[in-house]
Amino acid sequence: MINISKSYHCVKSGFCCLLVFLCLYGKSQTNLLMEAQELCNTKQFDKAIPMLDKVVANPETKNDPASWHIRSYAYLQSFKQSTGNITTKIKLLDVSVKSAEYSILLDKENTYKDNNTAFIKNAATSYYKLCIVLLQDSLDDKKSDTCYFKYKKYTFLLYPEFNFKEKDIEYYKAKGSTFADLYVKNNFNQKYGDVAKGALLKVLELDPKNIAANINLGILYYNQGATLMRMMDYDVDLSQLDVIQENAKKLFKQSLPFMIKVYELDPKNKKALESLQGSYSALMDEEKANEFKQKKEALTEQK
């Protein structure tokens, strides 16, 4: 609930309670702010927002930290009320967090510090959820990256000592595996493959022994090589045959280090054994291909 008088008002939500003391402004702007707060009190945030936009634009109230603070609250709650495709509502979070930042800048007495901090923290968490939704549902890796960077930006603002390594691994592994699957399911679409490789390489920069990233990269390169090899089964210009074959070999060679790493970390990984057998066979190294074939067969017999 929000209790209001002309001298003060109280804002309460599931995560904050504050007293906001108002200076004596022109009656029209003070009344407009109070009316907007009444609307917030009854959870009519979409109706309150246009009023608050006017309040923060007015010369009489634009430098009042309370005005920006209430605006941040209204935009954040409007986002939380959103239904349907929430990825179209990112602008609400953007305005909320910018308003909270500006309120902090103006708030020399730190009257609203705890609540502004809560708003920014809440928005940062929402940005992270959005970046995953954008990967899985919208397949928009650019917007997903933008949301992830905003999550990091505002988390760092609140917690400068925060170590993002684990979150980076988590995010880029999710991005890489999502687009690696899309690459296979969409006839080895090159765009999806490139997005997957870029994300998985970032994981390995942070964690070289990450099995999931190594195996997904190994499979990506292997599948790209196999796709080129299949092209040779069709009517291909003879002048291009050698080029295609050489490019395929390069891709199989690129697959090897990742699959070898997986094998070293997990000698019983069936996908690694199959990929190593196939890569060495494609590279005409039958001795190595047979070695991994036997290892794979021995693993099957053990079961």
Image (cartoon, grey):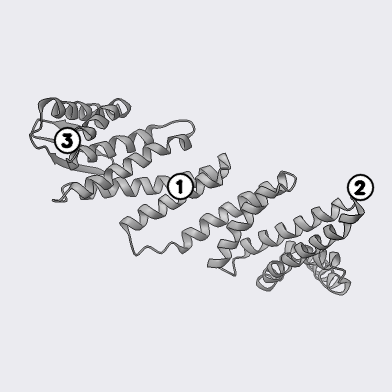
In percent of width and height, residue 184 lies at 72, 48
Identity of the residue drawn at 62% across and 52% down: 195
Image height check: is 208 above or below 42? below
Tell which circle, 2 or 1, labels the residue nearer the N-terminal end.
1
Q: Is residue 132 visible to the viewer in this orientation of the structure? A: no
Q: Is residue 299 left or right of residue 116?
A: right
84 or 25, which is in the foreground?
25
Sequence-earlier tag: 3 or 1: 3
Gap in angstroms between the C-alphas marked 3 and 1: 31 Å
Foreground residue among 6 and 23: 23
**SS for callout 1:** helix
Q: Residue at x 38, y 35 (%)?
A: 79
Element class at badge 3: loop
**Amino acid at the residue labelled 3:** Thr
Count residues near mark 1 (Cα–Cα under 10 Å), then give few for <14, some for 14-19, many for 20+. Answer: many
Q: Dividing the picture into quarters, in which one does residue 9 lie?
A: top left
Residue 65: percent from left, percent from top: 19, 42
Residues at discs 2 and 1 in contact (Cβ within 8 Å):
no
Q: Which mark is residue 61?
A: 3
User: Marks 3 and 1: which is nearer the front?
Assistant: 3
Residue that appears at 67% across and 46% down: 182
Disc number for residue 235: 2
Q: Amino acid at mark 1?
A: Cys
Please indicate whether residue 4 sits to the left or right of residue 293 in the image: left
Residue 49 percent location from the top left of the image = 29, 30
| Callout in the foreground (2, 1) | 2
Marks 2 and 3, how far apart in space?
73 Å
Looking at the rendered image, the quarter that the N terminus falls into is: top left
Q: Which mark is residue 147?
A: 1
